[in-house]
Amino acid sequence: MNRRNFLKKSVVAGVAAISIPEIVKAAMPATSTVDNADWYSLSKGETILFQGDSITDWRRDKKKEAEVNTSAQLGSGYPLFTAATILANHAAQDLKIYNRGISGNKVYQLAERWDKDCIDLKPNLLSILIGVNDFWHAKLGRYEGTVETYETDYRALLTRTKKALPDVKIVICEPFIVHGGSALDDTWESGFAAYRTVARQLAREFDLTFVPFQAVYNEALTQAGSDYWSTDGVHPSMAGAQLMAQAWIKAVLN
């Protein structure tokens, strides 16, 4: 097939595929679509911390937590992709970026380790993605929490954080699913939607920046299937991690 025929076939096969930056732009076309989009300006020497569950953890080496700005410490997921972009764009600012996500965590488990894994690090910019296990583990009968538990625990965690670190900039990332994933069934959308609503409402209540990951993944699914963006509908693929990184940067740093 010559080049002309290849290009013609590519266009006919589907509306020519768009890139991840274009997907993010389509899902987040203006500041009004991102709650409290007061973009953050990074200053020299600041510390950025990513917190959450397995989506954040993503095989980071917990024996190397003392390291900073390394792939071993950051893992293989969206914190690594986000950090790589931030460090490339702010080379002179001596930023320190950490990942303290732990697979399987729910909000109360963040709280149990919060002093060591958050407060003591004194982040200037704190990003939290939590919620999927609060729903999933309850659905599996391994946890007795409800969406009301999630809201109560999350509000308490945010209140505690603001009291200990009054100047910290907090980013609430929307918990999400990638429709069509192998780990999902028909009850996920109706059950998990309430957790997404709570996360958005808490961002508004505390006047925090909100990253609308669900809208971004929904838009991404118009370009490629679930298996392209996620390994199971819950955890991102490499492309999904890059998608999240670019959405995070657009919401937080523009």
Image (cartoon, helix red, strand yellow):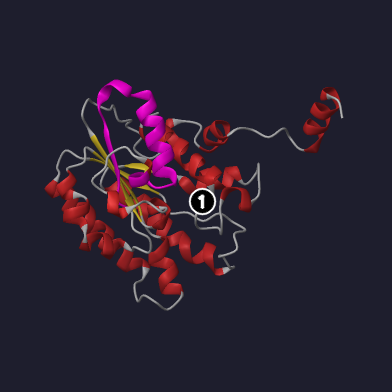
Query: Residue 10, position in %: x, y?
Result: 78, 33
Of helix, strand and loop, which one carries label 1? loop
Left or right side of 77 for 50: left
> Which residue is tagged 1?
236
Verify whether residue 122 appears in magenta: no
- The residue that appears at 15% across and 44% down in the rendered structure is 165
Magenta part of the protein: which range?
72-100
Q: State the residue at coordinates (38%, 24%).
A: 89
List the single residue furthest toward the bottom: 141
Task: Estimate the x, y position of residue 104 in percent, counting from the top left.
Answer: 38, 64
Q: Quadrant of the C terminus?
A: top left
Count of numbered marks: 1
Left or right: residue 64 compared with residue 190? left
Q: For the stretch drawn in magenta, what is the main secondary structure?
A: helix
Going 30% across and 61% down the picture, which residue do you hit?
107
Residue occupying the far front of the picture:
63
